[in-house]
Amino acid sequence: MVQGSWWHRIDEGRVQCDLCPRLCKLHEGQRGFCWVRMAGPEGMELATYGRASGFCIDPIEKKPLNHFLPGTSVLSFGTAGCNLVCRFCQNWSISKARADETLADTARPEAIAKAAARAGCASIAFTYNDPVIFAEYAIDSAIAAHEHGLRAVAVTAGYVTELARGDFFRHMDAANVDLKGFTEDFYRKVCLGHLEPVLETLAWLHRETDVWLEVTTLLIPGLNDSEAEIDRLCGWYLDRLGPEVPLHFTAFHPDFRLTTSPPTPRATLARARARAKAAGLKHVYTGNVHDVAGQSTYCAACETLVIGRDGYEIGRWAIDAEGRCEACGTPLAGRFAGEPGSWGSRRARIVIGAEG
């Protein structure tokens, strides 16, 4: 056990966790909703520090991040547990696992950073389950990554308190935030959470930080894919995040507790992308399907194809060394490093070990 942050003592000898909006109130020995944060004799303890469900090298576009060091590889890992219970969770074997059921790999932050650097990765990603619940481990790993010249990426649902989000995101270079839907009813019934804290996190990230931000919404037939909901989402997005923050619409596949809903039709993704672009969003993508046009990047000014993608493979590259469209000179929103990486669509599992 490692001592945790973001908590305070309350009545009856209990400890209140101040990390996420659930504000779990725990007697000594009790675990929070996420299962990995526990009240101990000295306060909050973190049960998963230094323990991971596995380490994989992925393309950065898999996070998905299309405007952050395109084509590069990222060392990805998660732990166990989650602070939401999404009925459609695609990583439920990790996010719903108890700590001891799935944490087979052990590695300290410095060992992770060294392994990523040796493998030629440009960044480390905290993903698979939500890094908010293992924030101390993620922050220390991000610090180690920076010391080795690497970037840090958070793939998160953004379900974090105002108190903790500054401490967490100040160490991140990029984030993909999973916006589950755009109604309180969806969040409450399907995710056992609330929409407003996520919207607050998104607006704050865009307004108050230098973190590169992209957003993903998994479209589930009959639950969050109506044209009216897409239009409301896009209206809020344009107003609070602006036209150039990338938005990814991805396809649902039946899983976990939502096995009776059909997979998302390609036409639904295409329609959502078209409505978002018509609303004024400049960089809208489709995911979990093969769609070259929906996965490629176009100049926000002249609409020239500047990054051609087929899945995770980059073909055309029409961005100059300063990150501008070669056709019209308009800067492309994002973080670029001159030339694209060449990792492609490979996925490689690695074992690090406690000392790297």
Image (cartoon, rainbow, N blue to C red):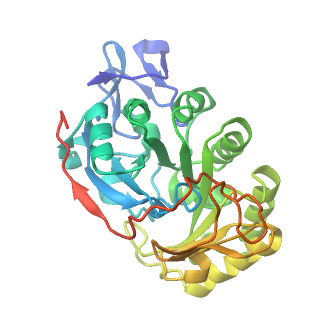
**x and y, in percent, of residue 95 in the image:** 36, 51
Where's the C terminus, which quadrant?
top left
Name above or below for residue 354 compared with residue 199: above
Q: Quadrant of residue 108?
A: top left
Position above or below: 18 against 322: above
Residue 107, horizontal then vertical, whole percent = 23, 37
Give percent across and percent down for residue 136: 40, 29
Instruction: Say left or right for 107 vs 3.
Output: left
Q: Quadrant of residue 256 in the image?
A: bottom left
Residue located 36% across and 33% down the image: 137
The quarter of the image holding the N terminus is top left
The answer to whether one can see residue 116 in this image is yes
Number of marks in the rendered image: 0
Relative horizontal placement of residue 246, taking residue 128 as reference (left or right): right
Q: Nearer the viewer, residue 143 or 249?
A: 143
Q: Nearer the viewer, residue 323 or 321?
A: 321
Front position in the image: 208 or 66: 66
Residue at image location 57% in from the left, 52% down from the top: 177
Residue 79 visible in image = no
Q: Is residue 311 above or below residue 215?
A: below
As drawn, 328 above or below 349: below
Determine the residue positioned at 33% across, 49% down.
77
Percent x, y of residue 130: 44, 46
